Image (cartoon, grey):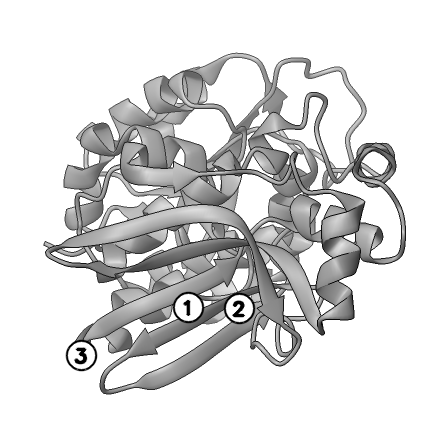
């Protein structure tokens, strides 16, 4: 039995569930000849009450990262986690993250490590619904043509509430009260969170260096109750859609509200869920749908990445 030391950055909802799931899957790791030891959990306030397994080593001092065999990042943000993760990556140690903003906006700092298989990030898009794994492996044999996806649960909730007759302001207020939307909610409703995720996806099927700046972004702030109800009268639904397709000799990436027929896979098979329609010449049309957010849903993908690393599978390698 070998011991693998894990360091965790952040202990919010996702981080707490990662710790719980690691403990819950101890027998599976043991079957692989591994005992997971959490060397430290970096937090701002170690005294703050949290729902963690007993004995969890909470600390505000990142020194423990030097002794960790693998680091799991669940803190969010860009500059702070990048600074904390760089020493591990430079030393050849793997990193597991769900941080789509970091991946999208600081790719120049991370791509080398992703190409070397040291970066695991299944949870960065659609959380526990596996889309990056298939796109980075078996779907590479098919000629990619197009994808459409609904990737933000906050926008999905707001637009669904508007279908029920509530105004945008009312639906947004409810989403914030339920904890679905931040204050301010610009990252979600402005379409930027979706653009981050689309950028990550594009690097597996279009261009391994696809830039976040090349995504055209329009959020849902301008969608009115009248537009939503008019769409319903036509047998359609308005969704915030991420779309990637060929446009001449380049790839066109766009995030925008679109009115889709009820029979569209994003409205039927992906009803009330994050969903992606992937189209390839050889594989045909594929639908991925499931939970795209939530603490345990996200943690399931992150601990799955940890299991992959223990088994010996490389991280998610973009197009060369």
Disc 2 to disc 1: CB gap under 8 Å: yes
Query: How far is disc 2 from disc 3 in space, using C-alphas?
Result: 32 Å
Tell me the SS state at disc 1. Answer: loop
Q: Which residue is mark 2?
A: 28
Residue 238: quadrant of the picture: bottom right
* Frontmost residue, 197 versus 215: 215
Quarter of the picture containing the C terminus is bottom left
Asked whether, in this view, residue 196 is left or right of residue 311, the answer is right
Residue positioned 27% across, 63% down in the render = 312
Marks 2/1: CA–CA distance: 7 Å
| 309 horizontally vs 207: left or right | right
Residue highlighted by disc 3: 141
- Label 2: element kind: helix
Per the model, the C-alpha gap separating discs 1 and 3 is 31 Å
Circle 3 packing at 10 Å, graded few (<14), some (14-19), many (20+), is few
Q: Position of residue 228 (x, y in %)?
A: 74, 54
Q: Residue at x 39, y 17 (%)?
A: 79
């Amino acid at each position: 039995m070998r011991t693998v030391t894990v360091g965790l950055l952040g202990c919010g909802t996702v981080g707490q569930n990662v710790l719980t799931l690691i403990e819950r899957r101890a027998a599976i790791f043991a079957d692989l000849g591994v005992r997971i030891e959490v060397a430290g959990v970096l937090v701002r306030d170690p005294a703050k009450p949290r729902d963690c397994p007993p004995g969890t080593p909470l600390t505000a001092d990142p020194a423990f990262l030097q002794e960790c065999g693998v680091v799991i990042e669940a803190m969010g943000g860009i500059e702070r986690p990048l600074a904390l993760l760089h020493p591990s990556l430079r030393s050849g140690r793997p990193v597991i993250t769900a941080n789509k903003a970091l991946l999208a906006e600081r790719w120049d700092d991370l791509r080398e490590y992703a190409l070397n298989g040291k970066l695991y990030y299944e949870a960065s898009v659609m959380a526990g619904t596996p889309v990056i794994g298939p796109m980075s492996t078996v779907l590479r044999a098919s000629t990619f043509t197009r994808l459409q996806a609904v990737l933000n649960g906050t926008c999905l909730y707001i637009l669904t509430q508007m279908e029920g007759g509530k105004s945008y302001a009312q639906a947004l207020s409810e989403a914030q009260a339920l904890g679905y939307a931040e204050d301010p909610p610009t990252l979600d409703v402005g379409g930027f969170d979706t653009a981050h995720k689309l950028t990550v996806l594009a690097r597996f099927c279009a261009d391994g260096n696809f830039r976040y700046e090349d995504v055209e972004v329009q959020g849902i702030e301008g969608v009115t109750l009248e537009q939503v109800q008019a769409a319903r009268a036509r047998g359609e639904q308005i969704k915030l859609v991420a779309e990637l397709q060929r446009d001449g000799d380049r790839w066109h990436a766009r995030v925008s509200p679109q009115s889709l027929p009820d029979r569209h896979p994003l409205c039927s098979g992906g009803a009330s869920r994050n969903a992606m329609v992937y189209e390839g010449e050889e594989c045909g049309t594929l639908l991925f749908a499931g939970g795209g957010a939530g603490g345990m849903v996200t943690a399931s993908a992150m601990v799955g990445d940890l299991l992959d690393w223990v088994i010996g599978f490389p991280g998610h390698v973009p197009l060369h």
